[in-house]
Image (cartoon, helix red, strand yellow):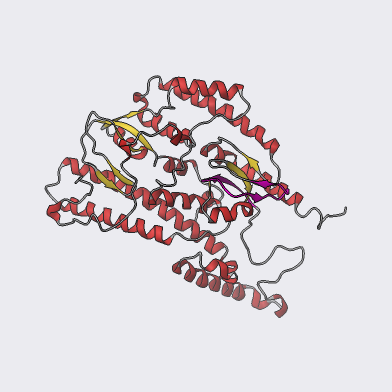
Amino acid sequence: MALPVSLRTSVIPQELELVACEQLVEIVPLVAMERTAFISGAYGPLRPPSKCKVPIWMAANLKMKKKCHIVPPEWLNVEYLQDRLTRETTEPQFSEMPFRFAEIAKVLLDVASDDFQNSDRLRSLLKDIREARQAKSREGLSKLDHSDLNLPNLCAIEINEIRPFFVRAMGVLTQLTKDPAGQQMTY
Amino acid sequence: MDNFDWSIPALGGDDENAIQVPRPAPRDDAPVPMQEDFLPIADEEETAFQQLIRHWMNERHAPDILPGQELLLGRLLDHIGKQTNDVRLLREDPDSSEDEHFRIMLVQTEVERVKFVIRSYIRTRLHKVEKYARHIMKTPELHQRLSKGEMEHVHRYALIVESHFSNAVLRGLPEEQQSLDENMAFMPPMVPAPDKTIAVFAFARTACPPVHLPDGTTLEMTKGQIVLTPYHIVEHLLLREDVKLV
C-alpha cells in the first residue's frame, strides 16, 4: 500500500527527529570547508577554531567522523534544566521548553555526550522533566470536551504521545454530543 | 564573490543562477535570540524544504486531502537534480581532493533527506487518493487540489475498483441492489469520505481570526498557541496557512 499501516494514524518519533534535525546548532569545526550551497541554504565556511552554525543533522554527521565539537544549545545545561524541573514540579502549568527539545537533546546526547559537561546528569534531568510533564498531560485529559482543548507549551514529541488516545476520546465525545437537539434518542 | 556554489569553474558547470530558491540570509552573523528556539515559526525565513516539511506534516495529520504543492515540489526536485549533477561532475574529476569528497558526502546526505520527505509526502497523498477515490470523483471541488498525475490515478483507480466489485459480486445480485452509492438510513455511506470531525492538533503560525466551536463559544488563537479541536473547525485556517498541524 501507498502508506504503511504503522504510519497512517500518526507520525513516528524518527520522523519527528528528522524534522527537528533541520534546526541549527553551533559547532566548533576541526576541519576546514569552503562555504557550500545546500538545498536548505548555504553553510560554512568552516574555519577551525571559529564557531559556525549548521543544521543538527550535519553537526551529528561531522561529530561521528570526529570532525567537530558541538556547542550545547543555551537550554541544554544542568542549571537551566534544573530550573525547569523545579518549575515543572511546583507550578501547575507546563513550563516553556523549545518545541522540539526532546528530539534535539536525544540526538545531541547520543552523538556528542563528550561535548557536554555532566551528560549523565543532563539525561536524568531530561527524564525527570519528561515524567513531570507526562503526569500533567494525563491530568489534562480531564479537561477534554468535544470542542477544543488548549495545550500551551506542549512539545512535539509529547503531542505525538498523547495523540492516539486524545483524538479517540474527543471523537467519542463528539459522537455523544452530536446534534443533541435534533437527534435525541429515546430509550 | 563568495564561493557560494558547488561547481568548480574548470568543469564548466557554472550555473549558480539556474535555480532561484529563496535562501535565508547567512544566519551566522545575526545573533539568534533565545526566543527563536521557543517559537520555531519564522515565517519569513522558511526555506523551500521547511515549507515542504510543514505541508508533509499537515498532509499526514489532516483527514482530508489538502491542495497539492506542485510548484514547491518542482522547485525542490530541480534543486535535487542540480545537486546530484554537481556531485556527479565532482566525482568524475580525478583531481578532487579529500576535502571535496567530504563535501560531496554532506551534500548527498542532504539530498537523501529531502528525497525521503518528498517520497513520504507523495505516498501520503497517494494513500488518500486511493482511499477516497470515488468520493473525489463525485466532488469536483476537490479536483483542483490534485495534480494531473493524481487526477489520472483517481480516474483509473475508481474504474478498476468499480469493475472489480461488479465482476466479483454485484453482477450476481438483483439489479436494484447493484448500485454502489445508495444512501440507506442508519447505514454508513457506501462512498467513503474523509471524517472531518476527527480531532487534530493545530499550531497557530500567526494570530488567527476567531472561529466558532461546536459548543457555541468562539476561539481566537494567538501565535504559537496549540489547540486540540475537530478538523472542520480549523480547516479554513489550515488552507489559509494560518495554522499548521503538529
- Using the image, determine if residue B124 lies above or below residue A140: below
Q: Judge whether residue B205 is colored magenta.
A: yes
Residue shown at 49%/36% (left/top)? Answer: A99
Residue shown at 30%/36% (left/top)? Answer: B29
Say which of B84 and B35 sits in front.
Answer: B35
Residue A1 visible in the shown view: no
Say which of B158 and B204 sits in front.
Answer: B204
- Using the image, determine if residue B29 lies above or below residue A4: above
Residue B140 image position (x, y, % from top left) = 57, 70
Residue shown at 47%/37% (left/top)? Answer: A100
Residue B71 image position (x, y, % from top left) = 40, 61
Residue B24 image position (x, y, % from top left) = 34, 46
Residue B221 image position (x, y, % from top left) = 59, 44
Say which of B194 and A40 sits in front.
Answer: A40
Along the horizontal axis of the image, is A111 left or right of A136?
left
Residue sitting farthest toward the right: A187
Say which of B162 and A79 sits in front.
Answer: A79
Which image quadrant is residue B182 in? bottom right
Residue shown at 55%/41% (left/top)? Answer: A160
**Magenta stretch in the rendered image:** B198-219
Residue A176 visible in the shown view: yes
Residue sitting farthest toward the bottom: B175
Number of residue marks: 0
Along the horizontal axis of the image, is A76 left or right of A181?
left
